[in-house]
Amino acid sequence: MGTLGSGSSGTAKIEALYRYPVKGLTPERLESVELTPMRTLPFDRAYAIENGPGPFDPANPKHLQKVHFVMLMRNEELATVRSLFDDATETLVISKEGAEIARGDLRTETGRATIEEAITRIVTSGLRGRPRVVVSPGHSFSDVADKCVHLVSRQSLTALEGMLGAPVDARRFRPNLVLDGLDAWQELDLVGKKLRTGGVTLEIFKRTERCAATNVDPETGERDMKIPTFLSKTLGHTDFGVYARVLDGGRLNIGDTLEVTD
C-alpha cells in the first residue's frame, strides 16, 4: 500500500482539526491550534470518565487501557449527546437534542459530580458503578502511552467508503488532523517519516489499530458498521490512521500544507 518509497516526498493539506477534551465525548472542531513539542493538542483527552471504581491515581498518573473508562466502544449512548469545553474555566457543558442537561467546572468536586450524575443518566448499560471524572495535569488519556497527535487521510476514507458502499464519517476514527492529498492508504507506509509545515515538524511513529468504537455512528449512536472486522477481512489488518509525535512546535491552521520528508 502507498506510493512513497524511501527518499520520496509528497504533500497533504490539513482539511480538519479536532480535539477531545474528555475521552469518549464529543470532538471539538478547531480552526487552528498551537502545538508544543512532545505534547498532545492543548486539552486533548485531558479528562476521562472512569467506569466505576478504577485504578487511576492522579498523584501517580499512568497510561491505562481504555477498558477502565466510559467509551464509545462499549457505551455507544455517549454519541447521542454533545459536549462543549471552555479552556479558560475548564467548564464542560453536555447537551442532548439541543437542550443543556449538565454544566460543571471540572476543576471542582461539585462540578465533576454534576457531570458524573449526567453520565449515569446517559449511559444506560455497561456501567460498573458510579462514573468518576479523572484528571492529572499534563496527563493525556489517549489510547497510546505516547503524547502525540492522530492523523487520518481523506483519500483513505474515500477508498473505505467505496469498499463498504456507504459513507464513513471521519469522526468515527477520532482524528486530531484529517489530511487531504495523500494517496489512499499512503499514510500507513509513512511510519518513520516526518511531516513539516512552517516551523512545525511531526514524526509518524505508529499505525493506529482500530477497535469497535469505529462501528458507532458519531451522530446517532447506532452501532451500524463492523469496520475493524471489514478491514481485517479485506486488507489483512485493522490499521486506519497513524500516530505522530510533535518534534517542533508552532501553529497549525486548517488549509496548511504539510510536506512529507525523511
Image (cartoon, helix red, strand yellow):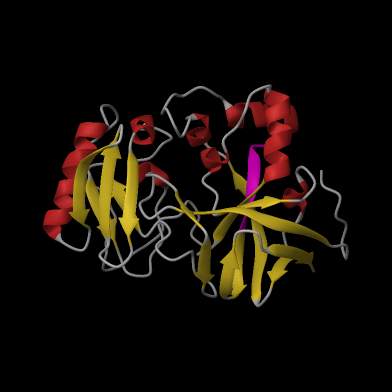
Q: Which residue is found at the position 88% from the left and 65% from the top?
A: 7
Residue 218: x percent and y percent?
Answer: 46, 34
Side of 210 where 163 appears, left or right: right
Q: Position of residue 106 (x, y in %)?
A: 22, 58
Quarter holding the N terminus?
top right
Q: Residue at x 73, y 49 (%)?
A: 188
Q: Quadrant of residue 91?
A: bottom left
| Residue 242, image x, y percentages | 64, 52
Quarter of the picture holding the C terminus: bottom right
The answer to if 242 sits in the magenta stretch is yes
The answer to whether residue 219 is left or right of residue 240 is: left
Vertical side of 255 occupied by 129: above or below: above
Q: Residue at x 68, y 29 (%)?
A: 161
Residue 197 against residue 206 in the figure, above or below:
below
Q: Considering depth in this image, is 53 or 30 the residue closer to the camera? A: 30
Where are the magenta residues, as a range? 237-243
Q: Is residue 55 visible?
A: yes
Q: Nearer the viewer, residue 97 or 139?
A: 97
Which residue is pictured at 73% across the width and 27% down the height? 162
